[in-house]
Image (cartoon, rainbow, N blue to C red):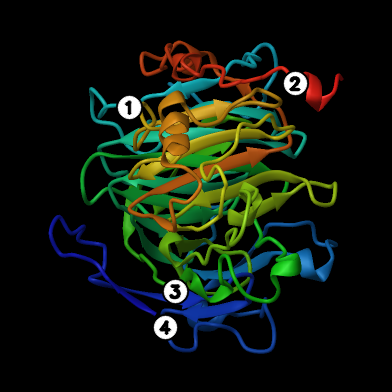
Amino acid sequence: MEESVRSQNLDSDFPVNLRYESGFGNHFSSEALRGALPQCQNNPLVCPYGLYAEQISGSSFTAPRKLNQRSWFYRIKPSVTHEPFKPREPSGHLISEFNQATSCATPTQLRWKPTEAPERPTDFIDGLYTFCGAGSSFLRHGYAIHMYNADRSMDNCAFCNADGDFLIVPQKGRLWITTECGRMQVSPGEIVVLPQGFRFSVYLPDGPSRGYIAEVFGTHFQLPDLGPIGANGLAASRDFLVPTAWFDQSLRPGYTIVQKFGGELFTAKQDFSPFNVVAWHGNYVPYKYDLSKFCPFNTVLVDHGDPSVNTVLTAPSEKPGVALLDFVIFPPRWLVAENTFRPPYYHRNCMSEFMGLIYGAYEAKADGFVPGGASLHSCMTPHGPDTKTFEATVAVGGDSGPSRIKDTMAFMFESCLIPRVCPWALESPYLDRDYYQCWIGLRSHFSYEEKTATDGEH
């Protein structure tokens, strides 16, 4: 599959056309030079073109075959060729160990307004900040939710996350991402997953860019089982795209690797680009997905389906049917349920829900929740439609006929773990301190009439 990239503001190292392989969980093979992949073995004594063989493992060696993830790179120089890592100052607002020393517990409903462009030039790394999370990257269990806000491309440096997988949801501005497997363009309305340990660099062709990130520790995202839905529907495997091999053989004096390790940042210098992989094969790869290709399922008679039916990707926990983190979307679709309150119902959930809005308006919030904003409803914290949405929906009545939700894309990161919120998120000038008032106007509609004597006494 080929994707065209607009030529304006074109990075000299970025191609006009990008090629992808398609499929989810496949074993891929890709080479930028014919014959660069060894045949019949992974690690020959001498690799073609004098390349080095290097494996990257996303699972333990002895993980069951269906869960085992790894890829082999054939590169000009191995990634071990760098100076020792040193702590990076400043380390930024990143957390991967959630406890009383680093974050706060609160059951209050929280909502944030969109952030404005950075006051000074900021690349993807410096634009990262953690909002909330649970668990620990050191214990290989948990997750973190970050946001990014940047306006400058990464220059002569690459980022590597040793803590977990990044699921990135751009909301504003395209991302041109170079990885060790090749290059991708990711636009708002698409997502990209960058697995643990991969080195990547982010170029911003449109200038200011912002978005959301879910990071999972100790597991990887997978497609949800479809159960009674059957063999087809939701996100199709063939719509996931994987980059094809591309390499940079130039000398890069002073090139910096920035590694996130235990939530802290470290740097190491080397004299070559980390994107010197001439060929690769395996099933541990970066990938992207266009959310507009999601095939939603919906209620066709009465009541409102649970949001789990809109799961795109899931990172499972050890308990069957319970997700460490689900990525759920609320895409354009028809609403046809009869005599039913169609927006999401009022709810208290044992799972915790972090929501974002990519574009359009969200069906349960008439005001206040806008593209680039976010909300958090933690375990057993009540939430649901605001007053205006409730009153408008009831006023229409039960015979409104089919209606179509269009021009919108909201999403949710949902987890079985209770999140702790970072102090800078609670102190942020973008925190909507009046969020609770969107429900204060809900009034009682209760009506009771005494039974007449002929109706009998109760």
Which one is earlier in the sequence, the residue at label 2 or at label 4?
4
In this rendering, the label closer to the viewer, 1 or 4: 1
The three-letter code of the residue at mark 2 reads: Lys
- Residue 33's label in the rendered image is 4
Q: Position of residue 119 (x, y in %)?
A: 23, 22
Which one is earlier in the sequence, the residue at label 1 or at label 3?
1
Q: Position of residue 27 (x, y in %)?
A: 63, 77
Q: Nearer the viewer, residue 135 or 30?
A: 135
Point 59% across, 30% down: residue: 263
Which one is earlier in the sequence, the residue at label 2 or at label 1?
1
- Residue 261's label in the rendered image is none
- Secondary structure of the residue carrying numbered label 4: loop
Q: Is residue 163 visible?
A: no
In this rendering, the label closer to the viewer, 1 or 3: 1
Q: Position of residue 139 (x, y in %)?
A: 77, 34
Q: Position of residue 358 (x, y in %)?
A: 38, 44
The three-letter code of the residue at mark 1 reads: Thr
- The C terminus lies in quadrant: top right
Which one is earlier in the sequence, the residue at label 4 or at label 3?
4
| Mark 4–mark 3 distance (CA, rounded to whole Å) | 11 Å
What residue is disc 2 on? 451
| Mark 1–mark 4 distance (CA, rounded to whole Å) | 44 Å
- Residue 115's label in the rendered image is 1
Query: Is residue 363 shown above or below 33?
Result: above
Q: Is residue 419 left or right of residue 355?
A: right
Query: Is residue 265 shown above or below 322?
Result: above
Q: Nearer the viewer, residue 176 or 374?
A: 374
Other-residue count near label 3 (Cα within 10 Å), few / some / many at <14 / 14–19 / ≥20: many
What residue is disc 3 on? 244
Other-residue count near label 4 (Cα within 10 Å), few / some / many at <14 / 14–19 / ≥20: some
Q: Is residue 440 visible?
A: yes
The three-letter code of the residue at mark 3 reads: Thr
